Amino acid sequence: MSAVERMPPGGKALLTRYSHGERLTHWGVAVAYVALFLSGLALFHPFFYWTSALFGGGPFMRIIHPFLGAAFAILFYAYALRLVRDNLLVPGDRKWLAGMFRYMNKQGDDVPVEGKYNAGQKLMYWSMIVVIALLFLSGLLMWRPYFAPGVDPTLRRVANVVHAAMAFVMFVGIGVHVYAAYWTKGSIRAMTRGTVSRAWARAHHPGWFAKVAGKDAP
């Protein structure tokens, strides 16, 4: 049996897709994002100020939001840098993108996936690399009292606009990410328990399945 396979009592062999460290980091990033999103809403518009109560009130929320942002960026890049190789685009990804909507609607033949992640997941990965970098840099220019006092007011206003725009882009991207995880049955289990069935791997990521399952792969 492969080193990445596990046999639960009375069950079928499962393939390990995510390690304990990967899952812990992923959920740490997720928790930090939720806290940032809720506190960011209160800072964005008075209509959402009620969310500040979740953080003990406005003053403490204003203090903790940028520290959460820094922790979020550190966690994300610590996780993302380990996944660069798996997210490099390959020629077969073009075919996945061309048939993406057929695949999502389960029409016609399944679109082959050569690696651990499909082209949609890879585009999400690279877009978040850029978006989170812009959020972090613009956040630094707005972060009082540590960085903002020495920043030109015009540049700080530009940073505010960039920060809000990137936060919206990220909100949409995370929404798509969560929906795709829910839509692809078995994906949430992979990130909670770390394993997937051989049938799931063969159906959704045949290239990765061939790599980890060896001779039993198609």
Image (spheres, rainbow, N blue to C red):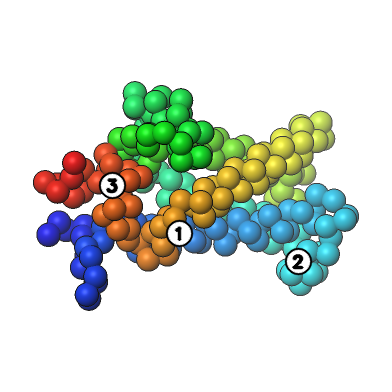
Q: Which residue is mark 2?
A: 60
> Residue 122: percent from the left, percent from the top?
44, 37
- Quote the CA–CA distance across marks 2 and 3: 49 Å
**Placement of 109 over or under 187, stated as above or below:** above
Q: CA distance from mark 1 to mark 3?
A: 17 Å
Instruction: Tell me if mark 3 has few (under 14), some (14-19) or many (20+) residues whose alpha carbon lies within 10 angstroms of its own.
Output: some
| Front residue of 113 and 21 | 113
| Residue shown at 55% from the left, 58% from the top | 30
Among the two numbered marks 2 and 3 on one chain, the one whose residue lies closer to the N terminus: 2
The answer to whether 155 is drawn above or below residue 190 in the figure is above
Q: Earlier in the sequence, mark 1 or mark 3?
A: 1
* Residue on which disc 1 sits: 188
Q: Position of residue 198 (x, y in %)?
A: 26, 54
* Kind of element beneath mark 2: helix
Residue under pointer 3: 202
Q: Where residue 28 sits: x, y (%)? A: 51, 61
Please tell me which residue lies in front, 209 or 99.
99
Q: Position of residue 40 (x, y in %)?
A: 73, 53
Callout 3, which amino acid?
Arg
Relative placement, left or right, of 85 versus 72 is left
Residue 90, picture quadrant: top left
Residue positioned 41% across, 62% down in the render: 189
12 horizontally vs 115: left or right: left
How many residues crowd mark 1 within 10 Å: few (<14), some (14–19), many (20+)?
some
The residue drawn where x is 85% and y is 51% is 45
